[in-house]
Image: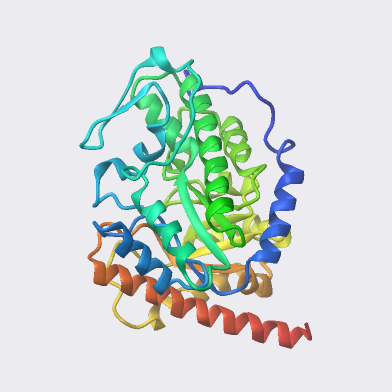
Amino acid sequence: MGEGRGRLPWGSASKRPYTTALMSRTSAAVALTPGLATGIGSLPYRDAREAAAVSLRCLPQLPAAPQLPERTPVEGMIVQWARALPEVSVASDGSMTVDPSGAAQPFTVAFDPDAHGGLLAFVDLAAKQAEQPERVKLQLTGPLTMGVALQRAGLSADVAFARAAVCTAAWVHELDALIARKLPDTQSVIFVDEPALVLWSDDDAPLEREAAVDLLSGVLTGSPSIMGVHVCGDGDRRLAFEAGAPVVSLEVRSDLADDAATIGRHLEADGWIAWGAVPTDRPIGESPEGLWKDLVKVWCELTRQGCDPIRLRTQAIVTPACGLAGHGPSQAERALRLACELADRVHDQSVAARLTLGA
């Protein structure tokens, strides 16, 4: 690794989170069911209640709290969460500046209707339903992506990633408390969003790999929620698996076969995959047929590489590949509908697989 890359003061991630990761995976195996569909990150709405209603209607089995950067720039993926740090200032246009002198100060986190309008509207609307959702999915910026943003804004690598880790962990705790207070009978699933993992794929990251695994794994432990990591596009998927994420969210693409051994071990340890089977970077049409063929093709190749074909189907969630803020509302709803149609097929195949095995 290059010069100037940060090192964190704590030890190896592969040892520290192992027991908790297995417990989280066991919780996932109990609380999740094959063929759930959910959303990833953002939706293209300016009205928070409308966005919440769309998610609850279109994703009934695992509705996702929306992020709404079109409603206000301060609901952008990074500033929405980093603003809790006293060294961070966020302008009305969503731009972020950092004063390094504040980086040693303690801080608290609290939701507010400006930066977290989509989340708060979603939880309030879910709580008012005649039957509260069995599960809900939440999402926040991961510590690696926040650390990269803080470093680029002026903090040293060591300070940036340490602050990001503490900040993200504090927000996970606050999300847990929010769901416990407003939806006490609902299981929460929390994804940390890590688009910065592409830097580790390119060997251009400001933090050494072992430290990055440690940082990410620390955020994934200790929560009653089922924790996941969303890996965007070309991001380093293996790093997310090494961190012990009970759920790993991946875009469906042909090069997943390169990581077949890693995916196989994850599934054997009762880990789940959220398959980003609905593309968000190109037109998708009205039919799920082509998307289903693409998903099954990837599964077949993974099976040829040694993955268990039953686990590929019975430990599977379906999602759009990424957030939908760049789409129109009708396009976004179509993407969510297609995810549900694909999830129904996953469910049917998982039932058939279990019947074949006599389970």
Q: How many marks?
A: 0
* Residue 290 point in image, percent of width and height: 39, 80
Of residues 339 and 236, which is closer to you in this image?
339
Q: Is residue 253 left or right of residue 188?
A: left
Of residues 237 and 64, which is closer to you in this image?
64
Give the answer, above or below, for where 330 lies relative to 212: below
Residue 78 visible within the image = yes
In the picture, residue 56 is in which quadrant?
bottom left
Colouring convention used in this rendered image of the protein: rainbow
* Residue 146 point in image, percent of width and height: 43, 34
Of residues 115 and 20, which is closer to you in this image?
115
Q: Is residue 124 left or right of residue 238?
A: left
Q: Is residue 243 left or right of residue 37?
A: right
* Residue 343 point in image, percent of width and height: 50, 76
Of residues 112 and 266, which is closer to you in this image?
112
* Residue 84 point in image, percent of width and height: 42, 31
Q: Residue at x 59, y 39 (%)?
A: 219
Q: Is residue 286 left or right of residue 102?
A: left
Q: In the rendered image, which quarter contains the C terminus? A: bottom right
Q: Residue at x 64, y 54 (%)?
A: 246
Give the answer, above or below, for where 300 lies relative to 229: below
Residue 1 visible within the image = no
Q: Residue furthest top?
A: 101
